[in-house]
Image (cartoon, grey):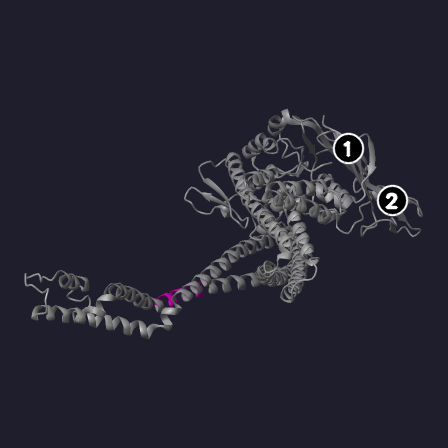
Amino acid sequence: MKIDFIKLENYRQYKDEKIEFPLLENQNLMVIQGVNGAGKTNLLNAITWCLYGKEKHLEEKYEGFPIVNKITLNELEPGKKCNVGVLIQMKDQEGKKMIIGRSLKFQKLKNGEMITARDPLSSSSDGATFRMIQQIKKDMEDVKDPEYVLNRLIPESIEEYFFFDGEKLNDYFRATSGEKIREAVFKISQLGLLENAIEHLENKKKNFVGRAGKLGSKAEEIREALNESEKLLKEYKKELNSLKERKGEAQKKEDEYSEKLRTSSIPNVRELEKERIEIEEELGKLEERIEELEKEKFDYLIKIAPSIFAYDPITKTKEMIGRGKEAGDIPPDYKKNFLEKLLREGECICGTDISKENECRKNIEKLLRECDDISNISGELTEGYANLRSIIDDLKDFREKQISYGKRIKELEEDRKRKSERLKKISEKIRGIDFEQIKRWEYKLTEYKEIKNNLVEQIAERKYYIAQEEKKIDKLNRLFDEELRKEERHKKLRKVLVFCDKSLYALKKIKNEIMEDVRKEIEEKTKSQFLDLIWKKETYKDVRIDEKYHISVVDQYGMEGIGTLSAGERQALALSFIAALNSVSGFNVPIIIDTPLGRMSKEPKKNIARNLPNYFKGKQLTLLVTEEEYTPEVRDKLSKRVGKEYVINFRETKKGSEAKVVAYG
Amino acid sequence: MAVNVNKKITDKITEGKFSEEIEIKDFLGEILIFELEHCEEARPRYMDKYEELINKYITKFEMKEK
């Protein structure tokens, strides 16, 4: 899918603009150059506003201002209305068109105030009109449920992996980003399709059970319990999704304010925020380590608990066997089967005939009686003695191990406490800075952190309830199946349910396998692209993405090296990761990157310019760059792939600012 | 404007080791095609379609049993 053109009408600094995009397969790279503040990021905002009704990359200087062009606003006569609109025409692989448009009307009141003239049919909160028209054969037809259809094509939850700001790519390496990325991978690899099939099949199975007619009293009881549990489970899952969404929003806000502090004009604030980010990352790892150790300690206790409770009988048994060994009773002097053989053959080893009753035979029979009991268990006793000794030895280590676990956990907890206290101090210091805006950002950051932490607790709680309910449903299903087995008339229903279960098992297995395959594929691609892009070829050797989607870089000494990456290297890693994510996705969506080379120095810039288009092969790629990024060398490296090249001409007047997008040169 | 199918999913179904006596692979293939074809609709009538497909495969299985 490619963008054919974008039309902007009175949208921020764009009064009336049409930007055509390149559609050729081998020249689908577009470059739009502009100085800082010219309106590059607002092109990105225009796209997200058109698609989702939200300006997702809005800079602070625009916050709170209406989206209508200021010149239009000033020139508008009182009582009159004006329209703000963004229209995007796209084309799919077959050349079929899709037009997406959003518009919002404003009215100037007599007192000069501007108000929104809401579309009475609008379903969006700002009152905008949203339309989507699709080409069906040769005709253009309105799409009935545009928000839904659009969300299938370019899901809002993952738009930031298609339309993004290169300067903010650093966020992917935050400890808290793993879950967000995992969810994006899930959506990006179309696993939602399997999710839908699983959900629909589960519902269908419930439907079969529900309409099964009259059952036996016990089966009826189970069916009712199943019904209740399933309702509850559905409710918990719905709550969990909503909590996760809210957590994601809080996280995003937290990241935004953290970024504001990290890039603020006050050096002290910048340093403090960087320190906070580092400490929070370390704290995350500390929490994981404490959790691991506590689990190890618990598992050890579970393993050793039976020996502790049976300590007395164990030591007594060991002593008894020991005494038997010392006395020479264990193992016995004579083997039972040896004495039996002598009696059977009627001849002693000394040659005496013992086939008949005589003194010698009587002696052997006496020996046999004495060793009979002990001989039966002699082997077990000898082996048992060794085992008991090993158990007692383990118990001797018990106290030591407990102390060691306790000591290690305490040390980590103290470290955690120190770090948490330092975080409090950092927050206090930032709040103490005599700058209203900084105080406000810090206050907001703390507020969103608290909201997020609260949501994390609620999420954990829901997850626990879900696990419990799933266990219960599993058990009830087994009981239900047992009941159905008892009656011949339910044979067909059983077959249907077994068929559903087998299919559900297969779908879930496929889903998990794909998730893992995709992770490995992204890891592999990120690694090869990153090692290709970076200039310190000998320093970094590996890139890993774990199950929780935490990204790490391994240096030549096998150590974690993400903390030592320069800003440019981090950007190269993020670009490699995002390109990998896009290449394994099933989505064919245009990619737009704002400031892709912002943090790079001269050589890496050339390197990335040479490689980047290849990483997004087959996709329409638009780069929004500054003059500093788009050096003659970079331009030269990209030239073969560039299909269109524009410059944003920006002018400021007394009535407001205006940007014009004109062809380069 | 159709979304591309992720080939990984269809490959997993084809290569997966699932119950042979009931043709689960074919069934999964059919329900996923249905999901794909109807993913652009807000409320697909999946209940009827799933019932139709399940009955089709159960009948096939019963025929085989006989």
Which chain hosts label 2?
A
For the question of whether residue A339 can be seen, the reply is yes
Q: Which residue lies under the disc numbered 1?
A: A97
Left or right of A71? Residue A283 is left
Magenta-colored stretch includes residue A405: yes
| Amino acid residing under circle 2 | Asn
Name the secondary structure under disc 1. Answer: strand
Q: Position of residue A338 (x, y in %)?
A: 16, 61
Mark 2: give few (<14), some (14-19) or many (20+) Cα within 10 Å.
Answer: some
Nearest the viewer among A444 and B45 is: B45
Q: Is the magenta region chiefly helix, strand or loop?
A: helix
Relative depth, front residue between A208 and A466: A208
Of the numbered discs in the image, which one, if any, rests on residue A74?
Answer: 2
Please give the name of the residue rendered at 54% of the width and 50% of the height, measured from the top-left corner.
A548
Where A309 falls versus A523 (above or below)? below
Across and down, in percent, residue A402 comes to 39, 67
| Viewer-side residue, A233 vs B51 | B51
**Dot 1 surroundings within 10 Å: few (below 14), some, or many (20 or more)?**
many
Circle 1 chain: A
Which amino acid, by three-letter code, is at mark 1? Lys
Tell me the magenta residue range.
A400-411
